[in-house]
Image (tube, rainbow, N blue to C red):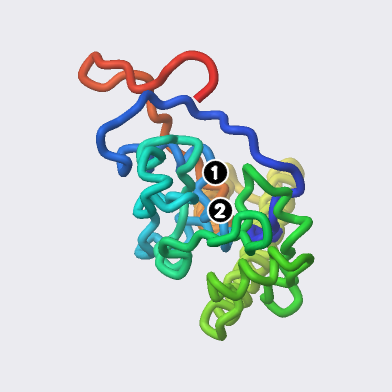
């Protein structure tokens, strides 16, 4: 299981928040929109809860020509603090010849970057991909070591889940053959169920598959979503 894979197809926006006065309010929608992963490095927020995730303005609202996009949902992305900091207010001065940081809504990201699980490196597939990797520093030594370690932990958890499920099947067979008492079976089965639950929870946190609480449609009886396209 590889949480760092880049999407093959372009992403179509699914969330439809109303317009807010504080762009940071969109964060909870963007978290759902992009499955709790940074759109640039693919880091799941659940695997590093102390890592600051926030809202990235793809077209920087600090630039006068994009000031009107500060609260525009389609210009906002879910982004880890590191990528947000490195991207900063970048925008090509020449929009025709300039380099772009790829995003999942305007680009098929897998055409430009892919993750090599054998060495923890993000590999470029185009000039845009190479530029994105460079400006966001996606292949610094710390990030590569972290991703390799996380992938190793995923493999260990997957093996332990398989082992625990195998133990549960063996225990059931023993009970059916009356080789273990009902009380001992109940205790052993309960311990295995707890172990499997904890292992799956840890795995989901590392992969970003941990369920996200629903946002809801109202707050203080005020609608927070709109109908139709965002």
Residue under label 2, please give it: 39
Above-or-below relation of 106 to 5: above
Q: Do we see residue 26 in this rendering? A: yes
Tell me: 174 left or right of 61: right
Residue 229 sits in quarter: top right
Q: Nearer the viewer, residue 92 or 197?
A: 92
Query: Could you tell me which quadrant the N terminus lies in?
Result: bottom right
- Between 217 and 79, the residue placed more toward the observer is 79
Indicate the secondary structure of the residue bearing disc 2: loop
Q: Residue at image x 58%, y 70%?
A: 150
Identity of the residue drawn at 63% across and 47% down: 104
Residue 112 placement (x, y as % from top left): 74, 60
User: Crowding near pointer 1: few (<14 within 10 Å), some, many (20+)?
Assistant: many
Marks 1/2 in contact by CB < 8 Å: the verdict is yes
**Residue 108 picture location, percent across and down:** 73, 49
- Residue shown at 62%/64% (left/top)? 157
Q: Which of 89 and 117 is in front in this view?
A: 89
Q: Position of residue 218 (x, y in %)?
A: 31, 19
- Please tell me whether mark 1 sits on a helix, a strand or a loop: loop
Horizontally, residue 31 falls left or right of residue 220, namely right
| 224 horizontally vs 46: left or right | left
Residue indicated by mark 1: 34
Answer above or below: position of 40 versus 194. below
Mark toward the start of the polypeptide (1 vs 2)? 1
């Amino acid at each position: 299981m590889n949480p760092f894979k880049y999407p093959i197809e372009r992403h179509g926006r699914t969330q439809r928040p109303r317009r807010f006065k504080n762009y940071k309010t969109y964060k909870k929608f963007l978290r759902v929109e992009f499955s709790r992963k940074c759109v640039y490095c693919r880091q799941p927020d659940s695997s590093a809860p102390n890592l600051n995730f926030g809202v990235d303005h793809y077209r920087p609202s600090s630039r006068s020509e994009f000031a009107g996009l500060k609260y525009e949902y389609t210009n906002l992305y879910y982004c880890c603090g590191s990528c947000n900091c490195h991207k900063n207010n970048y925008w090509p001065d020449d929009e025709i010849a300039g380099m772009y940081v790829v995003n999942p809504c305007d680009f098929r990201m897998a055409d430009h970057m892919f993750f090599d699980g054998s060495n923890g490196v993000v590999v470029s597939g185009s000039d845009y991909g190479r530029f994105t990797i460079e400006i966001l520093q996606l292949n610094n030594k710390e990030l590569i070591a972290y991703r390799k370690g996380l992938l190793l932990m995923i493999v260990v958890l997957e093996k332990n889940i398989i082992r625990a499920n195998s133990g549960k099947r063996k225990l059931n067979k023993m009970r059916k053959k009356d080789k273990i008492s009902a009380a001992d079976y109940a205790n052993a089965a309960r311990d295995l169920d707890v172990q499997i639950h904890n292992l799956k929870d840890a795995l989901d946190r590392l992969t970003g598959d941990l369920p996200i609480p629903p946002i809801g449609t109202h707050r203080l009886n005020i609608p927070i979503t709109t109908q139709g396209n965002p």
